[in-house]
Amino acid sequence: MALSISQYVDPGVYIGEVIEPGAVNVTSQRTSGLIAIAPRTRRSVDEQVVRGKVFDETLSLAVASPHVATLSNTSDRSRNEATLYMNGNELGLGDWQFVSAALVGTEWGGATVDVSNATGSQYLTLSVDGKRAVTIDFQAGQVAGIIAAAATASPTEVCAWINYELSNVAGTYYSIYGASYTAVATWAVGIAQAILTLTSPLTTSASDVKVFLSYGADAATVISNAGWVPTAAAGVQAPSIVQVLDAAYSSGATYTLDYVSVDTLMDALANAGTSTPLSDIQYAGSYPGGQDYVKNTDYEVGVANDLDWGTSSWAQAAVTTLDFVAFPPTIVAGTNDTLLMAINERTQISVTLTPGAPTTPAQVVIDINTALNGIATAYGPEFAHVAVVAGNTVVLTAPDAFENYLPEKGVASSIQFIANATDAFTTLFGIITQPYTVFGTGQRPSYGTAYFTTYDYDRPSTDYTAAHRVYDPDQLYTYCTQLTLSNYMRNKLCIAGEIAFENGASSLYLVQINDSTAAGSPTVTQTKAAIDVAGEYASITEVCTLDTSLDIAVYQMQHVASQSSMLEKHYRRGWFGMARDTDVGDPDTPDTYVYRATQTLQPGNNSPGRGRLFLVAPPNVSRTITLDTSQEITLDLDGTYAAVAVASVYTALPSPSSALIGKTITGFLSEGFGTYLRGERHTLASKGTLVVTLDAGVMRMIDPITTEAGGGGVVQFEEPASSAQKDAVTLTVDNLMSSNVVGIVPDDLSDFISDCKKWILLGILANITNGSIASYRDSSGLPRDIDAITDIQVYQSASDPRTFYFKYWYNLKYPAKRFFGEYSVDNPFFGPA
């Protein structure tokens, strides 16, 4: 077309490309859409989960600088595992940071506190930055002169003694902590009195402060004024605080953080949530497909649609003595006063028991805990509460004051007793054989490490309102859920999908029927709604509904006709089967093959659905399915599954003109595959049924035809390949005209019409060249070139210059099916051809 520029342009050279009709490339693809029921849950297979990962926690940042927020859970402070978002956009590591770990107490009630050994609380046990837990003795601070009077210790004195013990060369724990810990303990004035703070000197991921319950009079509650209240079962750990730097802060923005928590027992699952509740967890393991974590022992289905590691079965190693009332133990010095034991496979420790006739549970507890607390390098304060009095017994439990410390949790925790010369084990526990070892129950992955889980969750509502495309069986199983003992009878979509892939389908569209009223038994209305969903996808060219009812057959036929119209342009074919044991029948007997083919599946002489319907026989097929447990079950299926197989072979044909004749299907057992007498097969084929014949174990299509054979009998509508050839040419011409002609403003009408003809010609020629359709032939039957004058017509509407009409014709390809010959003997009976 000529250049048309009406606006002012500066003097110069302006060059535009002229699109002239040239060579075009066309392809044709056929894809099945399967419509059926499937489980109302989906399965997420081997989803990788990071233990303790928290997602999208909204931060309540301080408006004034510094802009800090305390996390809901204690974080491992790893910057590699944490991501901060501002209004959904990821911030850089330089925009935010973790603040040094700190434990802040509450304001004192007075100017001093009592940390004396006589009237107060003498000990503070803490661990900073993951170093060994140590116990600060405030009475020793008085002896050293740093605390003037332990009964009335000031905040300055308390802080000074803590820092001295940790960081002074002369301090008890200098070798463990050192000079960097000179300011761990600090205080500031609150409203009127002191507020004590314990702060890590580090800013790295190692920054941490933990407070344990001391063995003896614990001072943590006193010096924090109940801000820190450790117990034997639960210590106190510094919260995790995040700071957004001033340059990255905006008061109106929303900040969210992903991070790894070290104290949560619940892990979020990617696909389970409020709208898609978690249905069940199949298994969890340390590697894909692994099941080394045991359901309801190690983990369970959480109440918040998560995987919960806090099962009631989980337990640290524990052992209980005999009842001291029923079996009063007498401990004699030098005879039976020693327990040789090891906890969590650490160094063996010898516990000397106080003689008693009988001894008491309280005394045994004191003896054991004192011994454990006193061996700092192997045990120490973390083990100072292993033994407790429980009624008339003593219970020993491996320590578990923090979720992330000590590392020996569950089955990794242990308590062992070893025989010795003055053994008290049998006296206390009534057990003779040693060594005697008990282990905890349950195992969990470490915080921050990945594990894999497979679980079922309720399908999102969109699964019932959209088609889902899959390209291999793995994707099929992900969508449908693998066949299981509990779901295989209502997982028709999965079974049909397996058959389709076995018969050459390169991809499939899956449309699930929303059987919300009764799972496994959808209503007619629900099935029709699923067929309507398939109408929204132009790429679906073959439609097969796994339903043999008359109402659905009629609705699918109407669907094919309407979608194949010139307005919808979703050209497709419908594939049908019949219920098991359906008779051959005749045109007057409902619910038979011949009746369905000749009476029901006849869309009308001018319907776009004519020649697009396939009724497949036999109605009885059988298949062996394999469940997720590798168990095999043989199922009796109806004719719709055979239709799926034939449709899949059809989509796998290399060209629209390729024939189904002689092709075979697979996926079914020879035993149980319906067979026909020759006369029955001839009746079915002549009346428009595509019969798959079992021949020496091979399931072969002898004469595949459409239902047109049972109606008008027009050859172009009988052959399966005809509609595919028509669709290929129609879509090609439609695409070329829409992309290259529609919207053009002709400068020269003759030139424009010529271009229109060229585009149509090129579309037809491309399909001839790639073998989709036949070539043109002259009156002698010899191939000829396409003629733009005689084979294509384009003209403008006489009443509306914006409207153009075009016409074209071409030849279809047909398979050679029948050859009839004659012969004579001794004498020729025909002349040379």
Image: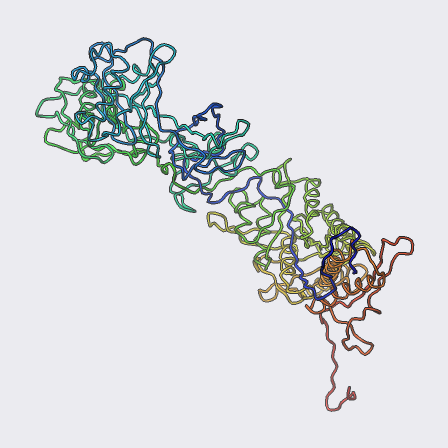
Measured as percent of width and height from the top left, residue 176 is found at: 22, 31
Q: Residue 530: percent from the left, percent from the top?
A: 67, 44
Residues 479 and 158: in front is 158
Q: Residue 431 falls in which quadrant of the image?
A: top left
Residue at 46%, 47% in the rendered image: 629
Q: Depth check: give the residue in front, 677 or 49.
A: 49
Taking the view exactly as shown, the residue that stands out farthest to the right is 799
The residue under the point 72% across, 49% down is: 556
On the image, the x and y values in percent for residue 394 come to 24, 22
- Residue at the extreme left of the image, as rendered: 334
Q: Who's the residue at 84% across and 69% down the image?
A: 789
Residue 493 makes an appearance in the image: yes
Q: Position of residue 817 (x, y in %)?
A: 71, 71
In which quadrant of the rendered view does residue 795 lie?
bottom right
Q: Is residue 108 left or right of residue 716?
A: left
Looking at the figure, which quarter contains the C terminus? bottom right
Q: In which quarter of the image is residue 277?
A: top right
